[in-house]
Image: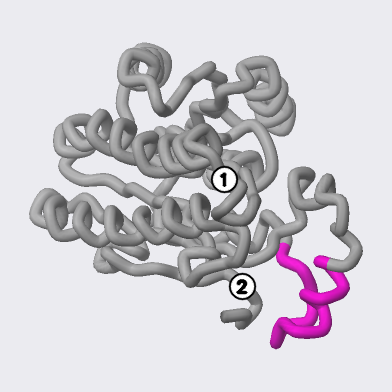
């Protein structure tokens, strides 16, 4: 199937590791030129280099998505490198889990700012470029946690807010042929998840309680993102695609 992605240009925030790296890899596999953007510039460059060795077109950028000037530089550098921007994947995010009575402002602000403020700043910067191209794609990586998880008030609130943001942006920008969708992964087998102290228990519980009895792979999420970025998804906007193996 021709997805119509060859020579398109994508920015993937949080693109250096885990789900972001898988998204960058699969987009490159479809001929997309990818800017791997991450707060960890060294790892972003390593990921971009691996993509280039595999035959893809990729570059790396160090970005703090909560900083307006840093985001502006990211978009300027991407246009300077690749000439245009067609796709934005707002993937940057992380967890700082604890019960609400132990959660300080630092833990709340850090998570909410990266997920929500980051998506706001990057989307605002992307829209004029997508309008210039006559359309484009924005894909926000939310989480099944938008339904609520104990110990994740900050993360759940941020990911739920990202869904509201997605739907608002879909309504605002559809007339300009810009689609805005979200993907909500469940438990995905990333290095961050593997580093959790009770990873084995989490994995085993997922296998027992998920209708598809396994933990998710980053490629499961990346495949959905590639579809939403493609020309086949040109009439899909404002949607939330759960990649959870049926776990709600």
Report the residue marked by disc 2: 244
Q: Nearer the viewer, residue 165 or 152?
A: 152
Which residue appears at 36% of the width and 54% of the height? Answer: 162
Relative to 202, 29 lies left or right: left
State which quadrant residue 238 falls in.
bottom left
Q: Is residue 210 magenta?
A: yes
Residue 204 position (above or below residue 45): below
Residue found at the far bottom of this picture: 211
Instruction: Name the element at disc 1.
Output: loop
Disc 1 crowd, CA 10 A, few/some/many (<14, 14-19, 20+): some
Label 2, label 1: how many angstroms apart (C-alpha)?
27 Å
Q: Nearer the viewer, mark 2 or mark 1?
A: 1
Which residue in the structure is indicated by mark 1? 103
**Residue at figure coordinates x 54%, y 39% from the top left:** 104
Residue 191: x percent and y percent? 78, 44
Query: Residue 5: horizontal and vertical position, in percent?
Result: 42, 46
Does 40 sit above or below residue 16? above
Q: Nearer the viewer, residue 139 or 1?
A: 139
């Amino acid at each position: 199937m021709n997805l119509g992605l060859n020579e398109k240009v994508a920015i993937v925030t949080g693109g250096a590791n885990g789900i972001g790296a898988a998204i960058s890899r699969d987009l490159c596999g479809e001929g997309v030129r990818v800017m791997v953007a991450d707060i960890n510039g060294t790892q972003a460059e390593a990921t971009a280099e691996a993509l280039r060795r595999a035959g893809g077109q990729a570059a790396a950028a160090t970005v703090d998505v909560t900083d307006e000037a840093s985001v502006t530089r990211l978009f300027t550098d991407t246009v300077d490198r690749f000439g245009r921007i067609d796709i934005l994947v707002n993937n940057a995010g992380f967890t700082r889990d604890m019960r609400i009575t132990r959660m300080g402002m630092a833990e709340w602000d850090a998570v909410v700012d990266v997920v929500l403020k980051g998506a706001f700043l990057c989307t605002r910067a992307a829209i004029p470029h997508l309008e210039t191209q006559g359309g484009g794609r924005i894909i926000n990586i939310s989480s099944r946690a938008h339904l609520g998880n104990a110990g994740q008030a900050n993360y759940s609130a941020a990911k739920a807010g990202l869904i509201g943001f997605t739907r608002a942006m879909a309504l605002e920008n559809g007339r300009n042929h810009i689609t805005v969708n979200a993907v909500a992964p469940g438990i995905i087998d990333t290095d961050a998840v593997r580093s959790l102290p009770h990873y084995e228990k989490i994995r085993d519980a997922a296998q027992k309680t998920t209708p598809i009895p396994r933990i998710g792979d980053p490629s499961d999420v990346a495949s959905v993102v590639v579809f939403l970025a493609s020309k086949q998804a040109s009439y899909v906007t404002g949607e939330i695609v759960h990649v959870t193996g049926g776990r709600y």
